[in-house]
Amino acid sequence: MMQNVIYLRLKPKQVVKKGQKILLSDIAWISTNDDTVKKKLSTLYLHTVTKEDQTYKVFDLFTIIKRIHTLYPEYEIESVGGSQAILVIYQPKPKVYPLYVAFIWCLLFVGAAMAIMNFHFDVSMEEVQSTLHEMISDKNENRSVLWLQIPYSIGLGLGMLLFFNHFFKKRFNEEPSPLEVEMFNYDQDLHHYVSFNENELNKEDEK
C-alpha cells in the first residue's frame, strides 16, 4: 500500500495586495496521491493581508506543517526547497512628474561626468593622449589632439553600453549585466534578512 505523503514546495516570493485572502496554493506547490486532499489543501485559508503587515509577510514551513497535521494527522509531509515563503505587499507607485525625472536625470548625468573626469585627471589621461598623439603623428604635421580624443570618448560611451548590455530596454544578448547580477545578489540578501527578521517564530524567540 502506498504511504500517504504530502509534498510541499514553498514559493519564495509572491506579490499580494492589501485585503487579499492568502490560501496555501498561493504560497506553495502541493503534490499528493489523493486529489481530494490536494484540492482541500489548495483552498486552505492562511491569512488576510492587512495594514499591519506593512511591506512583508513571512510564512514559515514549520507553522504550515503544524496546520496541515491538525487536518490530516495520518499524512506524512515532505518539504522540497526553501523553508520560508515571502509575501511582498503591493504598494501603489507614486505619480511620476516629468520635472522630477528631468532633475534626477541631470543629477545622474553630471555625477557620472564628474566621476569620469576625476578618473581621467587621476591617471593623467590628457598627458597620456598627448604623448600618444606625438608618437603617432608626423612631427611636421600640426593638428589637434582631438582626432584621438573624440574617438576615445565615443568608444567610452559604446563600451559602457556593451558593459551594461542594455540600450534603454533593448538587450544585446542573454548574458546578465553586472548591474543585474548585483541587483540579484541584493535581492537575495534582502530575502534572507526578511526571512529572519519578519518571521513570527523568530520574533517569539526574541520575546
Image: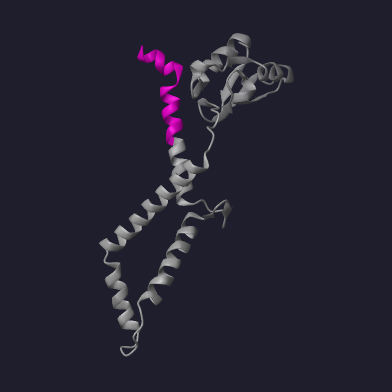
Q: Quadrant of the C terminus?
A: top left
Residue 104's place in the image compared with 153, above or below, is: above
Q: Please, which residue is most extreme toward the bottom here?
A: 140
Q: Could you tell me residue 189's position as x and y percent?
A: 42, 35
Q: Please, which residue is most extreme toward the right here?
A: 36
Query: What residue lies at 51% left-to-right and 55% top-to-bottom?
Result: 165
Q: Indicate the quadrant where residue 15 lies.
A: top right
Q: Which residues are magenta?
A: 189-207
Compared across the picture, whether 178 is left or right of 36 comes to: left
Q: Is residue 199 magenta?
A: yes
Nearer the observer, 123 or 176? 123
Majority SS type along the magenta span: helix
Query: What residue lies at 36% left-to-right and 15% top-to-bottom?
Result: 206
Q: Is residue 129 magenta?
A: no
Residue 192's place in the image compared with 44, above or below, is: below
Query: What residue lies at 56% left-to-right and 18% top-to-bottom?
Result: 49
Q: Is residue 142 visible?
A: yes
Nearer the observer, 93 or 63? 93
